[in-house]
Image (cartoon, rainbow, N blue to C red):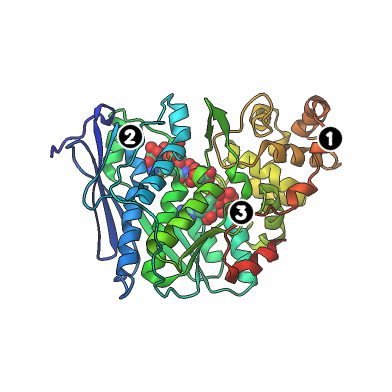
Amino acid sequence: MTSVYTDPRASQRFRFVRHAYVDGVAELAYAFDDGPELVERVSFPGAPAVPAGREMAFAAALRLLHLVAGVSYYKAGIPGTLVVEGEPLDEDSASLADALYLHGLAEFAYRNRLDLRGRVRFPFAAKGGGKAPAVGLPKRSLLPIGGGKDSVVAVEAVKSIGADATAVWVGNSPLIAACAARTGLPTLNIGRELAPGLFELNRLGAWNGHIPVTAINSAILTLAAILYGYDSIVFANERSASVATLEYDGQEVNHQWSKGFGFEKTFHDYLHSHVAADLDYCSLLRPWSELAVTSAFARLGGHYFDVFSSCNRNFKILGPKPADRWCGQCPKCHFVFLALAPFMAKPRLLSIFGRNLLDDDALAGAFDALLEYKDHKPFECVGEGDEARAALAALAERPEWREDALVARFRTEILPQLDRADLALAPWLMPGASHLVPERLRGALDALG
Ligand SMILES: CC(=O)N[C@H]1[C@@H](OP(=O)(O)OP(=O)(O)OC[C@H]2O[C@@H](n3ccc(=O)[nH]c3=O)[C@H](O)[C@@H]2O)O[C@H](CO)[C@@H](O)[C@@H]1O[C@H](C)C(=O)N[C@@H](C)C(=O)N[C@@H](CCC(=O)O)C(=O)O
Ligand SMILES: Nc1ncnc2c1ncn2[C@@H]1O[C@H](COP(=O)(O)OP(=O)(O)OP(=O)(O)O)[C@@H](O)[C@H]1O
């Protein structure tokens, strides 16, 4: 093994070297060729020991996390050969990883003009199938908190049925911590430290770009569920997250791929077959569009208005964060402003954002992209173009909004080109059919209707 990092783009192999859990810390080690190890650490507060009877489930979950979290490092070099050291993978594990690395890195590949098809192939030595045993997990839920509107809506729905739940988050964001505290639920904060070597590789010119972070958080929370004892991990990923950002060369590119229903179903089934039959993984908001979620947030989220933010610039590990909770310049700020506007009193919305983003001519191009007008949807966590159009069409009818610069522009320039029958708001507020919410939590789904 050498001790000096070199440009990973010249490497031949990406190795999953080892994983371990010691004193409450999961250590995940990777390497390119025979280069220095890249070690990511995930810390579980209270350093819990693995409970008796859950050892196999824990080992399977740790192995899963090692596979999933490797995506941050693999992307730095994308060599043609993947090597999983130690016990070989079975077909199901290889297939989950193939899908994650191909689709979860689709935006990364598209923006770097790379093609990962045929390149990502995890080796396996055994057939898949089977069913993991139940391990007696207590009937309580982990509710991940992201600092924004979605998790707030899910939390309030679960609280409304009095289910036993803990607000959990990964990483050290003070903004998320403030939101979690505001839920009034017990809280759990899991530490995550990327391998410092990744930043060194970035300085050496590594490939860089977007990764499927929800998959990584999901695998971390799987370990937490086994360690602390929870029978369900309940995300707040809406229906709109399953819709691709764009299509390119016959391939869908979805910025939010690991928030989509395809990933949810694959991960849910994998937990039941390989980790624990009594561990559920779902998204409570899956039946709902972004507009249905913003409408619910306007209704249920009042006591979070002064702490929440959906602006992802707050969540950077490196570099400066915005001076205010809402930078007002990114697609996420623009979309959330637009999606809340039909459901919230205008002065209230302006006080949250500090200004009126729909009255700023300079943002015309940014809002056009949200509408998928002259451009594709931005690479961000934003809703469908059609729902953005429905929201603006609703504002175009409201006296308090219709003269604002971008609403007026929509009325005169864009609206005449659209079919008004496609612009109704009401259909966006109806639930879709697909979800994996377990029986015990179904009442929370009803609370959102
Ligand atoms: C906060 C954010 O949006 N970051 C994205 C940004 O990264 P940037 O370089 O500006 O700053 P850092 O986040 O500090 O990242 C530093 C480097 O580390 C890499 N990295 C980070 C986390 C990780 O888990 N693995 C990593 O390899 C990162 O690539 C940087 O080199 O731009 C990056 C490139 O496009 C994005 O990858 C960063 O996104 C973060 C991983 C992140 O947490 N983003 C979420 C806010 C996010 O985008 N969520 C999506 C969900 C997508 C999904 O499928 O899960 C969403 O809400 O739609
Ligand atoms: N640091 C984190 N730790 C744990 N879960 C997270 C973290 N960041 C996001 N999540 C979860 O991932 C899912 C998607 O995140 P997303 O950013 O869409 O949600 P949000 O922050 O609640 O809402 P918004 O869309 O307004 O940003 C949510 O269930 C959220 O709770």
Left or right side of 223 for 242: right
Instruction: Give the residue pinned by disc 2.
Output: 76
Q: Secondary structure at mark 1?
A: helix
The answer to whether residue 4 of the structure is visible from this angle is yes
Question: Looking at the image, how many numbered discs can be counted on the residues?
Answer: 3
Give the x, y percent position of residue 156.
62, 65
Q: Secondary structure at mark 2?
A: loop
Instruction: Give the residue pinned by disc 1.
Output: 420
**Amino acid type, residue under disc 3 in the picture:** Arg
Residue 45 circle label: none
Q: Which callout, 2 or 3, points to the residue nearer the camera? A: 3
Residue 9, compared with residue 399, is above or below; it is above
Residue 116, compared with residue 238, is above or below; it is above
Disc 1 crowd, CA 10 A, few/some/many (<14, 14-19, 20+): few
C-alpha distance separating marks 3 and 1:
27 Å
**Toward which corner of the image does residue 48 lie, by quadrant?**
bottom left
The answer to whether residue 147 of the structure is visible from this angle is no
Q: Quadrant of the C terminus?
A: bottom right
**Amino acid type, residue under disc 2 in the picture:** Ala
Instruction: Give the residue pinned by disc 3.
Output: 286
**Toward which corner of the image does residue 403 lie, by quadrant?**
top right
Give the x, y percent position of residue 149.
61, 54
Disc 3 crowd, CA 10 A, few/some/many (<14, 14-19, 20+): many
Give the x, y percent position of residue 118.
38, 31
Residue placed at 26% from the left, 41% from the top? Answer: 197
In the image, the residue with mark 2 has its CB under 8 Å from the nearest atom of ligand 1: yes
Do tag 2 and tag 1 residues touch (Cβ < 8 Å)?
no
**Amino acid type, residue under disc 1 in the picture:** Arg
